[in-house]
Structures are given as structure tokens and as C-alpha cells.
Amino acid sequence: MNVGEMLALAGVASDERPSSKKLSTSTQELFRSAATTLDGLVLCVIEKRTAAEFLTAVGEVFPKYFEAALGLSFLARATVPAHVLERLTMESFSEMEAEFRDGALEAFGAAVRDQAIFTVWTLRKISDICQKISIAPALAANRSTDDFETFQKFAVHAMLTRFNLDCLLKSMLLRKPIYPAVFDTVIEGLRSAVNAYAWVRHALDLREPRVEPEVEPVQWDEEDQALLDEATRDFLPDPA
């Protein structure tokens, strides 16, 4: 499963998005059905009045949201050529950035607009790393447990980020304000992107360990030591 595609494709089926025009009519209909399910799950939580009610509702609908996004990614792989799917993924992130850039200032203010755009940028980077993982060498058997646990933590944080972004998108596009107590919780949910990035980076490191550059030892001679001693004396107080 490619969580990078799950992160990107939830909005592709929208009739207003140019990226949807790259799909066949039959595929658009299938995507639209999945997107309608995702939209309905998001809309039922942004109507809540308190943070406690919102969190309870998220706990109930998020597993369904995850399954619907997963189903959409499987559908995409089965019906869309790989090169088209890759382009759709990139364009979906660009379209999300444009929607926040054009409408979030009026809807939420500059600080939230900037955080939302940064979150989309982070998800784009996460999706790029997912692509690298998909073509990386297979892990050794003794690393599989660590990899599975890493994937579970990554996937939850990544999709929670996307869920909270969708809350902001639907509120903005439908002009449906989120109650203040809930709004703060949604913004806090965007910070799951930081955890998601850390976990997906760890998953890639399991497959392609980063090589730290070798640093040549500094050759320290008597002249260097004399200069250091002189500089040190300049900072010492004069004796009383």
C-alpha cells in the first residue's frame, strides 16, 4: 500500500479540480463515489461544537476515513496507468496548495493559511519518500517487525494530518465555519505531519541507511596552539 497516494488522491475526483479531467468517465464516477464517502465523514465532525465532541466523532469516523482512502488508492492503482497516477498525485498536492493560498486568508487568517500550506508541502515530501520506499531493496527478515511498527505509526499520523486538512478544506470551500473550540483542535491535528515525516524517514533509513560524511581530523600544530592561547588571554580579566 502506498500511503503517499492515499494522502494525495482524496480530492482528485472533485469536478472542480483540473486533475480529475485526466481520468476516464467511468473512473471519475468510481473516484467520485469514494470522495463522497470521505467528504461525508469529514462534514459530520466539523459540525461538532466542542473539542470533546469533535475528538469523540473523529475516533468513530477516522477508521472509516482510512479505509475509504485506502480503497481509493487501490482503485487508482487498478484503473489508472502508473505515469498518470504519478502526475495526479503531484497535481493534487498543487491544487490543495492553491486552494489554501487563494481562500484560507479570508477564511482563517494568515497564520492558519501559512500552516496549512506548509502542511501540504510536508505531505508532498512524505509522498516523495513513499515513492522511494516503494522501489527500495527489500528489508532483511530481522528488520520486518521494526518496519511494520514504523509503518503503523506513520500511516496513522499521515492520515490524521490529511483528515484535519480536509476539515479545513471543507470548511473553507463550503463556507461552513468551524466552532472555535473545535478549530483549535483541528489546527493541533495538523502537527501530526511532523511525526508522520519522522516515521516515514525512519522507514526509508531502514532500507537505505544514510551515510554520514567522513570528517578529516584537524591537524593541530604548535603555532595554532600559540594563537589559541593568545586569543584566550585576550578574553581573561586583567589581574587586580
Image (tube, rainbow, N blue to C red):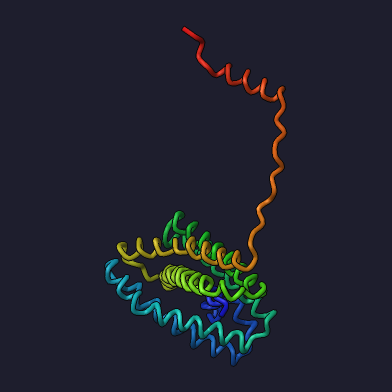
Residue 52's x, y, as percent? 27, 68
Of all residues, the one furthest to the bottom in this rendering is 26
Q: Is 192 in front, or is 94?
A: 192
Rendered location of residue 170, percent (x, y):
43, 72
The mark total stands at 0
**Left or right placement of residue 143 versus residue 52 in this view:** right
Q: Residue at x 56, y 79 (%)?
A: 12
Q: Measured from the top left, where is residue 235 in percent x and y?
A: 55, 19
Res. 131 image quadrant: bottom right
What residue do we see at 67% from left, 81% from top?
82
Q: Position of residue 159 (x, y in %)?
A: 47, 72
From this viewpoint, which residue is outermost toward the front?
142
- Closest to the observer, 56 or 115: 56
**In the visual, does 53 lie left or right of 146?**
left
Q: Is residue 114 above or below residue 139?
A: above
- Residue displayed at 35% across by 67% down: 178
User: To which quarter of the image does residue 167 belong?
Assistant: bottom left
- Farthest residue in the top direction? 240
Question: In the rendered image, is residue 222 in sight?
Answer: yes
Q: Is residue 68 left or right of residue 45?
A: right
Quadrant where the image shows the N terminus? bottom right
Q: Does the rendering let one see residue 102?
A: no
Residue drawn 31% across and 62% down?
180
